[in-house]
Image: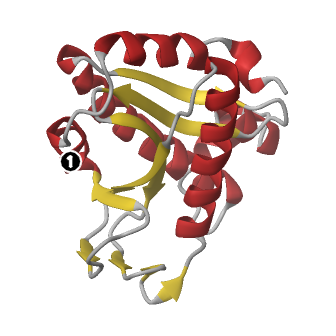
């Protein structure tokens, strides 16, 4: 994200000013970066509980996976969504932000499927990946789904919820998947 922000505005002084201009593309990317940092710090709290985390995992295309969390409860592909001061609502198949429908669910599901395919191929065994959306700085988060296809959480609950899920992976399996995930060659193809 930092690279994209630098591309949008190479001048450091103008980049700083544009971070505060409502509606500017630089501000949008800067808000996203803040969301990713907040989520990353929260996920790093899982380390003492047998989890490994990776942040900004780069695909060959230049796109990235915001975060991967690999631990006793499985593998999670986590998208950070900063909606500062907004009302976020999650139903059975959609998220709205201040009443406008987003593509957050479809994008998160697609990313998790892709991550699962790659990790399964590279590790030599099936690696299910669950999509998660970390909602950062929303004024209100309402969840109205009995069995959501994507786990949507306020960032302040992220580490507690993930570490509270039932274990499905042995420590050896967690370490193996993490070793595969942290190898840059995994994401190069």
Most extreme residue toward the front is 125
Q: Position of residue 1 (x, y in %)?
A: 64, 37
Q: Is residue 29 above or below residue 43?
A: below
SS at badge 1: helix
Along the viewing direction, whichever of 130 and 127 lies nearer the viewer: 127
Residue 172 falls in image quadrant: top left
Residue 18 in view of the camera: no
Q: Position of residue 103 (x, y in %)?
A: 60, 72
Horizontal side, residue 48 vs residue 98: left or right: left
Q: Is residue 81 above or below residue 143?
A: above
Q: Position of residue 45 (x, y in %)?
A: 23, 25
Q: Tell me the residue at 43%/66% (across/down).
A: 149
The C terminus appears in which quarter of the rendering?
Answer: top right
Horizontal side, residue 49 vs residue 44: left or right: left
Looking at the rendered structure, the number of numbered marks drawn on it comes to 1
Residue 125 falls in image quadrant: top right
Name the residue that disc number 1 marks: 156
Residue 44 in view of the camera: yes
Q: Tell me the residue at 41%/64% (across/down).
A: 83
Disc 1: CA contacts within 10 A as few (<14), some (14-19) or many (>=20): some
Looking at the picture, the colour scheme in use is secondary structure
Q: Tell me the residue at 36%/40% (across/down).
A: 39
Horizontal side, residue 162 vs residue 176: left or right: left
Q: Position of residue 173 (x, y in %)?
A: 41, 16
Q: Tell me the residue at 51%/27% (across/down).
A: 55
Along the viewing direction, whichever of 59 and 131 lies nearer the viewer: 131
């Amino acid at each position: 994200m930092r690279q994209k922000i630098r591309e949008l505005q190479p001048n450091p002084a103008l980049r700083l000013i544009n971070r505060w201009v409502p509606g500017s593309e630089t501000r949008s990317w800067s808000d996203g970066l803040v969301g990713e940092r907040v989520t990353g710090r929260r996920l790093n709290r899982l380390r003492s509980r047998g989890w490994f985390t990776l942040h900004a995992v780069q695909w060959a295309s230049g796109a990235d996976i915001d975060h991967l969390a690999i631990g006793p409860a499985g593998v999670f592909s986590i998208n950070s969504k900063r909606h500062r001061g907004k009302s976020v609502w999650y139903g059975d198949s959609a998220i709205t932000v201040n009443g406008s429908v987003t593509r957050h669910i479809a994008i998160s599901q697609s990313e998790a499927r892709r991550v699962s395919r790659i990790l399964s191929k590279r590790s030599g065994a099936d690696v299910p990946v669950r999509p998660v959306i970390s909602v950062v700085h929303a004024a209100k988060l309402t969840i109205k789904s009995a069995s959501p296809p994507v786990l949507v959480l306020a960032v302040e609950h992220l580490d507690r919820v993930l570490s509270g899920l039932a274990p499905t992976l042995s420590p050896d399996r967690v370490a193996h998947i993490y070793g595969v995930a942290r190898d840059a060659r995994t994401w190069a193809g």
